Image (cartoon, rainbow, N blue to C red):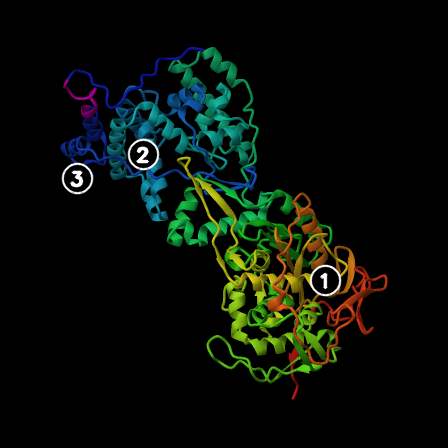
Amino acid sequence: MTSRRHEVRRGPVVCLRGLVACGVLGGVLAAAAALPMVGSVGITANNVARTLTVLPAGPREDPLPQRTVLLDKNGKQFAQFYTENRTIVPLGEVAPIMQRAIVAIEDSRFYEHAGLDIKGTLRALVTNTQAGGVRQGGSSLTQQLVKNILVENAQTSAERAQARAPSLKRKITELRYALAMEKKYTKAEILERYLNIAYFGAGAFGIEAAAQRFFSVPAARLSLRQAATLAGAVRTPYATDPSLGGQRRARLRERRDTVLDRMAQVGDITQAEADTTKRAPLGIRLKPEPGGCAESAYPYFCIYVHKELLTNPVFGNTRAERERRLARGGIVLRTTVDPVAQRAAQRAISARVDADDTEVAAEAMIEPGTGRIRAMAASKKYGRNAGNSDNGPRTTYNLPADVAHGGGMGFQAGSTFKAFTLATALGRGWRFDQGFMTPGRFEPDSGFVDCRGRKVNDPRAEVFNASGEGKGGPYSISTGTWQSVNIFYMMLERRVGLCPVVRTAKALGIARADGTPLREVPTFTLGVNEMDPVTVAGAFAALGARGRYCRPMAIADIVKRDGRRVEVPPSCEQAIDREVADAVNHVLSGVFTKGTMKGQSIDRDAAGKTGTNNGYTSAWFAGYTPDLAAAVSMGDIRGSYRYPLSDVRIGGEYYGQVQGASLPGPIWVASMSAALEEVRPSSFHHPDMGRFGGGFTPGMEKDDKGEEGELRATGPRGGWEHAAGQRTGGRRDRAHRPHRGWQDGWNRWRPRRR
């Protein structure tokens, strides 16, 4: 293969020492005089001369948009997103034959002129005039680079249209900038910039993305046939897009053959080489466009990261600034997702809930003490259903997240909120065995004041214990929690104060999924606010970290375009007293040993709370160890009130009613067991018994072990029995038997009929 020498130098080529550059100015004047529109717009040759001799500094060159790459915590890529599929490469990583091909077809005198190809301009002028339209381009490669830069810099559609407008004014502006760039850069630098900015079709911006998209090879390994094809695509990338069918490919082949002939004409290859290559097929091996979040292995986590970049002030002072940075991309994000935890969560959900079920399960896992989100999983796949149907195996809602991160309105969190009332009571001096007598029903008609000082009593409502069967009786802080007694917790909330409970919840990061203010109502402790798993898991993670709340975070560090690594530190604060958190952990650990989750464990220290809502509209389990916290939600995606979780078939199994312990609980146990399999168990700190131990509950006598109202397992189904022998219910057989006991904290309340 033969080739010409390509001169590389900076600035214009000077013909004679101290004289005008190679006839550029004279050529400009000649070209200007020949343009039929010059006189009509009042531009004289002298004006053109002055315009082209007093040059600007050059166009503003913003960083080109590139892909943003997401890595898991181990450094393995799992996703990417971008506005333009582009990977910038230096000229040394572009095959020399590709460089020669693009120069031959777009600007064969590129190495001879100073930004304006006079012969090419005049030739195009004559050709287009004779044809009565544009048939041949006269812009130099440098002018094309300028045009692309101006289009990239445009912020609005009007600015982009102006950058492409077929006007003399635009051409003169381009030419001035082109001459300025020829003074600023070497020819090699100009060619590198052109190859990285040009659009080749099929969604590929820049030569590296184009080589990968068209032929599944890097730009450094392009052959003559491939290089000629890509060089031919630049002129009309939409008309020759190989991804759009056979007709476009036929046009692309014509363009390839034109490039090969031109390369032979200018001496880059022989005519024999051109003829041989023209007989070969295009050899297109389309590589799928790099997928966004929908094609990611962890789509819900990917969406969360994308939204976090747009909403978190850490990544830009204003949303507009954050949007610009995201559009430019070109950064590498090492995220917090743990493949082991993610796989564990997804498998636990998929084993129990089918993607086609309208009932959806979602789970988030968060590391206590850092807030790092380790997993986000859901029963449905992410994406659009066939025909954009609302029902199907896919969803475009980020089910484990809040609205700000692409999620929906969430589900009422149920009795998981009792943990905040518990923490408030313990922080105000209550002891483990301290309690009171409760009635069989409760009317919140007095004693409830919100954080604005307003009375929010609701005398029209009646609150019952689960299933409406509770007859009241004595309960302590411990037994009231283990049995998830609604009336006990309503009365406890009134005693410690609604507002203090709300403040505790807020300190632990609790906020509604839809972003609106929390509903500060008497049934706050029963979880009437709609929540998302990430937020709830973050709150319970704080308990596992001895009261230290850390804002959920998905990004650990950022590698910028210049290679600098910027760490994103956790954002944490001590939300509740450490000893109070230890006491909460002690009580909530009993949920596994004496309460609603008895018979289900992960063989290490764990604490948690079930939640089942009024009318079985939703079900939750939120739990944690010192090493990992997780929250699982369950509800019908069509609407939890219209479609309660009763008399349903989920994952091929029948459920009379879905409660926190019957489906979210087992998902939590399975996912946490697998996620922590290789993690050495950690233990909770023992509570200060001098501060929290003891207490008195009228009407409750201690058993032989000194524990009030201890529950012990009986029967093959793992039911519970009071120490006195009264049967209160059993864990429902997963497939057939509805649970009829205190039902994992079903928040039973209804407006009172008068």
- What residue range appears in magenta? 18-26
Q: Which residue is drawn at 19% across and 39% down?
A: 40
- Cα distance, mark 2 to mark 1? 64 Å
Position of the N terminus, as image quadrant, is top left
Whether residue 315 is visible, yes or no, is yes
SS state under label 2: helix
Residue at the far front: name it: 690
Q: Please state which of residues 91 and 162 is positioned toward the viewer in this rendering.
A: 91
Indicate the quadrant where residue 498 lies: bottom right
SS state under label 3: loop
Residue 131 belongs to magenta span: no
Residue at the far bottom: name it: 754
When the figure is inspected, residue 113 is found, relative to residue 401, above or below; the finding is above
Report the side of 425 relative to 517 (left or right): right
Number of the label disc, if any, that sits on residue 661: 1
- Cα distance, mark 3 to mark 1? 83 Å
Please tell me whether mark 2 or mark 1 is closer to you in this view: 1
Q: Where is residue 526 in the image (x, y as percent from the top left)?
A: 62, 71
Q: Please state which of residues 687 and 249 is positioned toward the viewer in this rendering.
A: 687
The disc, 2 or 1, on the residue closer to the chain's N-terminal end is 2
**What residue would you read off at disc 3?**
42
Check disc 3 and give the amino acid type.
Answer: Gly
When the figure is inspected, residue 56 is found, relative to residue 322, above or below; the finding is above
What kind of secondary structure does the magenta stretch mostly adopt?
loop
SS state under label 1: loop
Q: Residue at x 70, y 59 (%)?
A: 665
Check disc 1 and give the amino acid type.
Answer: Ala
The disc, 3 or 2, on the residue closer to the chain's N-terminal end is 3
**What residue would you read off at disc 2?**
146
Please tell me whether mark 3 or mark 2 is closer to you in this view: 2
